[in-house]
Amino acid sequence: YGTYDPTAPEGDDFGRSQYVSKRDVRVIGVLLIILGVAAIPLFRVLERNAHRSTCRSQLGTIADAMNQYASLHDDRFPPIMRTGSEGEPDLGTSGYPYTWASDLSQFMKHNSSLICPEAQPNEITKVEGQGTVFGLTYGMYEPYGGYLRTIVPNPDQTVLVTETSNHGANGTYDPLPYKDSSGKEIPWDGFVVGWKNSNGQPNNHSDAVTRLAFPGSSSGVFKRDGDMRHDGGILAINCSGSLLPPIKPHEAYVRMKAGLRSGIWEAPASYATSR
C-alpha cells in the first residue's frame, strides 16, 4: 500500500489521493503568507541588531584613531573644525567642512565607513578628508575639541563622540545651524554636538545639547520614550575611548551640579581657555 501507480485514476482512493488538490495549494499558500508576514518583524530585529553592531565597530575605529592622533599631537583631541572669519565651518575649496573626523581619517583604513547603516541618507554629514569627501553620522562633543585629554575631569563618564543627524534631518533638534558671513545656512553641521542656544561657549540657559540622532525632537522636547536611531538608545564613546551605555532621548538634557554641567555632558568650567 502506498506505492505510486501512474495508471491509477485520480480519486480511486478518496482517503489518500496521490495528488495535491487545489484546496491543499490554497491552504499551503495561506500558511506561507502567514509565515512570511510573521517573519518580517523578526528579520527587522535581526537587521537592527546587525546595524547596531556595525555602529559599535565604527565607534571603536574612531576611538583607535583618536588615540593615534593624540599620541602625535601633545596628547590632545583633534579640533572640532577649521573655522572661517565668523567662527563658522570653513568650507574651503571643496565646499565641505574640514573637521575632527577629517583629521582622524589618515589613521583609518581606506575602506572604513563612518556612516551608521541605520541612519537615513539625509542624516549623513559630508566632510572633507585626506584628498576626498566622505560621509559621517557621528558628532564630537564641542567642549573637548583640541582639549588635553589627560585633564578631562571624568573621562570614563563623559561623552566624546556620539551619533548625530545632519542639519535637523529626520526631525532632529538643531535650533542653531551654522551660517556663513553672508547669513546663509551651512548645510553641514552633524559633525558636532553643540548647545541649544550657542555654537560655542555655553551659558546658564544651555540646558540641552543638539544634533543627536533622536527623530521627532525638533521642538526641543526630549521624551523618555522618544524615537531613537537604535532600539535602547544611541551609541557613544567616552573620553577614555570606551563605549558608554546607550543614550536615551531624555538624556539630551544637561544635568547641572553646583552651577556646572555634570554627568555625561560634563564640561570643564573654563574649557574655552584650556584648549
Image: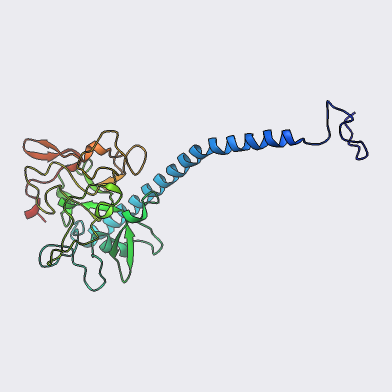
The picture quadrant where one finds residue 75 is bottom left
Question: Could you tell whether 81 is left or right of 68 in the image?
Answer: left
Quadrant of the drawing holding the C terminus: bottom left
Residue 65 position, x and y percent, is 30, 57
What residue sits 14% from the left and 39% below the top? 262
> Residue placed farthest to the bottom in the image?
93
Residue 231 position, x and y percent, is 37, 38
Residue 17 position, x and y percent, is 83, 31
Quadrant of the drawing holding the N terminus: top right
> Residue placed farthest to the top in the image?
15
What residue sits 33% from the left and 55% below the top? 122
The residue lying toward the viewer, choosing from 266 and 231, is: 231
The residue lying toward the viewer, choosing from 220 and 238, is: 220
Q: Is residue 55 above or below residue 108?
A: above
Q: Is residue 222 above or below residue 121?
A: above
What residue sits 92% from the left and 36% below the top? 8
Question: Could you tell whether 206 is left or right of 130 in the image?
Answer: left
Residue 48 position, x and y percent, is 43, 43
